[in-house]
Image: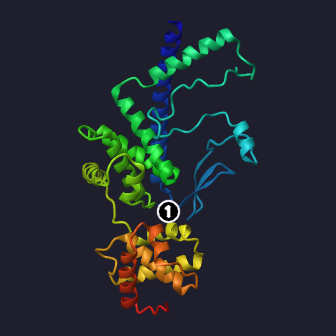
Amino acid sequence: MQEVEKLKILQTEREALRNRLKERVKEHEKKAEDHTETVCPECGSRQLVHDYERAELVCQNCGLVIDDDFIDRGPEWRAFDHDQRMKRSRVGAPMTFTIHDKGLSTMIDWRNRDSYGRAISSKNRAQLYRLRKWQRRIRVSNATERNLAFALSELDRMASALGLPRNVRETAAVVYRDAVDKNLIRGRSIEGVAAAALYAACRQCSVPRTLDEIAEVSRVSRKEIGRTYRFISRELGLKLLPTSPIDYVPRFCSGLNLKGEVQSRAVEILRQAGERELTSGRGPTGVAAAAIYISSILGGERRTQREVAEVAGVTEVTIRNRYKELAEKLDIEIIL
């Protein structure tokens, strides 16, 4: 029972820390709004410069010092490499939306050593084991947190399988949390909503992935992901533009080991095709693959239609039809 009481105290401290953090975030946002709305009282200019050496806010237009004696919020130490930065830092990891409690929970280290690095006795080791067990139990206290914990771990798994960057994972977690807040999860599978949120995040961050690629790493079908994506984008008011074929060019060229000149020429071909509305009503991956195929021939780094089709995830017939359209409409002479 002593361990339970200790964990309850830790949970109370965690809630207090979370409330303090929220208050500090609100204060920071308010100060940021005040700074963005600040104008020069002399000339009315909004071009203000922070002089960190003199701790002054100066108007770039007339040179008036608007504010001074700023507080330096940076560290008082210097670091010249990653190891020094990690050793001298006295704070924990930043807040993240990819964990159900945003990374603010109390963690009990898995290593059986104290703060000085000394080994812990067997008696205290058994107590630590019990503390870890109760920590795992109380970390997820209700059904909403259990839902978030499972969904966010599923999001992280799919994002890792697709090799997506950190900003896409954070955006997907925010989209899923918004769906939970608006009670859009009821009656739908957690995996389906998580996959749809990841697809929406990819489009928001201009890191396009097709529904087929999302479906390959998820546990639901392509049809269910598409239906859920349309539902949550409508309910959450997500303003997402159609995917451009140009967004797929860097990834496809990297998969084909093509040089930068070939990639630039493919982008130029797609820009010309977009100006003449040749990409409307056609799949962006097929058009991008056809442009890369044409560019590889013109650049002297020819790739076969089968190689391009395997990287782009389309059929050879699609590439053949699209590249003939592009070559004919843009007057590109291709010597096979």
Rendered view: 15 above or below 195 = above
Would you say 198 lies left or right of 182 here? right
Rendered view: 287 above or below 16 = below
The amino acid type, in three-letter code, at marker 1 is Cys
Secondary element under disc 1, as helix, strand or loop, is loop
Residue at point 43% right, 41% down?
154
Residue 209 falls in which quadrant of the image? bottom left
Residue at point 32% right, 38% down?
180
**Residue 76 visible:** yes
Q: Position of residue 104 (x, y in %)?
A: 51, 31
| Foreground residue among 216 and 241 | 216
Residue at point 31% right, 38% down?
181
Residue at point 36% right, 58% down?
211
Q: Position of residue 226 (x, y in %)?
A: 29, 55
Q: Residue furthest left?
A: 187
Q: Which residue is mark 1?
A: 43
Would you say 311 lies left or right of 224 here? right
| Foreground residue among 56 and 15 | 15
Residue 223 falls in which quadrant of the image? bottom left
Rendered view: 237 above or below 278 = above
**Residue 35 visible:** no
